[in-house]
Amino acid sequence: MGVALASAPDEDPLPGTVGRPIPHYDVRLEKTELGEEMVVEGPGLYRAYRTPPHGERAPRKGPHRTGDLFSRDDKGRFRFLGRNTSVLKVAGEKVHPEKVEGVLAEHPLVRECLVLGVRHEAKGETPVAFLLGKETERPSDKELRSFCLTRLTAQETPRRFEWVKELPRLPGGKVDRKVSVEDLQSLRQR
C-alpha cells in the first residue's frame, strides 16, 4: 500500500510511533478480538491489492484491512503493536511479541531478538525471548527481567531469555516468525 502515515518534517517523531495519516487517506482503528486493527482507504492502495492474479476473484472496493494492530496516542500518532496472527494470550492478557521485542532491542547489549509464545499450564502461553547479543557480555535473566518490567507488564515480560547464535531468516532478510521454539533452542549459545 502507498504511504498512508508520516511524521511532519518539522516534528521530532516519538520513538516507536509511525506518524499520522497523510491528506486524502482515511486511516482508522477497528476493534477486533485481539486489539485494534488498522483499516486504510485512499488513493495510493497498491494495484496489487486491487488486481488479483489470474483465476482469482477481484477484491471488493473500499477500505483495506491491514491485519496490523495499532494504538493511537492523544496527538493522533499511531504505534505498531503487532500482527493479528502474532498475538499471545498470557493469563487472559493480550501480549504483542513485537512490542516486547522493541523494548528488548533498547537494551545496550541486545542486537536483535524474537519473542515467541510457549505453552504454560497455568497461563495458557508465556513469552520466551531468543536474543542475539551485541557483544560477548550477556546480562543475566534477572537484569533483563528488571529492564523489561520498567516498560512492560509482568505478563508481557518474557519468562525465559535464551541467547542464540543466529535467528532464522526469510529470503528477504526478515526474521522468520514462523520458526518453532524447538528449532530456536537448537541454535542456543552454550
Image (cartoon, rainbow, N blue to C red):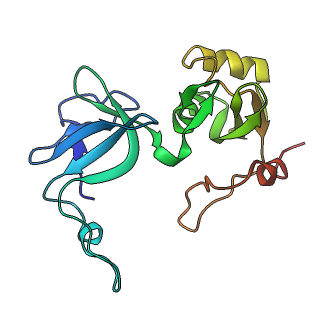
Q: Is residue 135 visible?
A: no
Outermost residue toward the right? 190
Residue at the image point whose x is 61% and y is 27% from the top: 107
Q: Is residue 110 visible?
A: yes
Front in this rendered view, residue 179 or 171: 179
Q: Quadrant of the C terminus?
A: top right
Residue at the image point whose x is 27% and y is 28% from the top: 12
Task: Give residue 95's position: percent from left, percent from top.
Answer: 56, 31
Q: How many dots with numbers?
A: 0
Q: Is residue 113 above or below residue 90?
A: below
Task: Give residue 78's position: percent from left, percent from top.
Answer: 31, 33
Front in this rendered view, residue 1 or 54: 54
Q: Quadrant of the N terminus?
A: bottom left
Task: Give residue 49's position: percent from left, percent from top.
Answer: 29, 67
Outermost residue toward the left? 24
Question: For residue 88, which quarter of the picture?
Answer: top right
Query: Going by the image, does 1 lie left or right of 99?
Result: left
Task: Give residue 136's position: percent from left, percent from top.
Answer: 79, 37
Question: For residue 68, which quarter of the picture?
Answer: top left
Question: For residue 112, which quarter of the picture?
Answer: top right
Front in this rendered view, residue 49 or 119: 119
Outermost residue toward the bottom? 54
Residue at the image point whose x is 73% and y is 18% from the top: 143
Query: Going by the image, does 111 lie left or right of 81?
Result: right
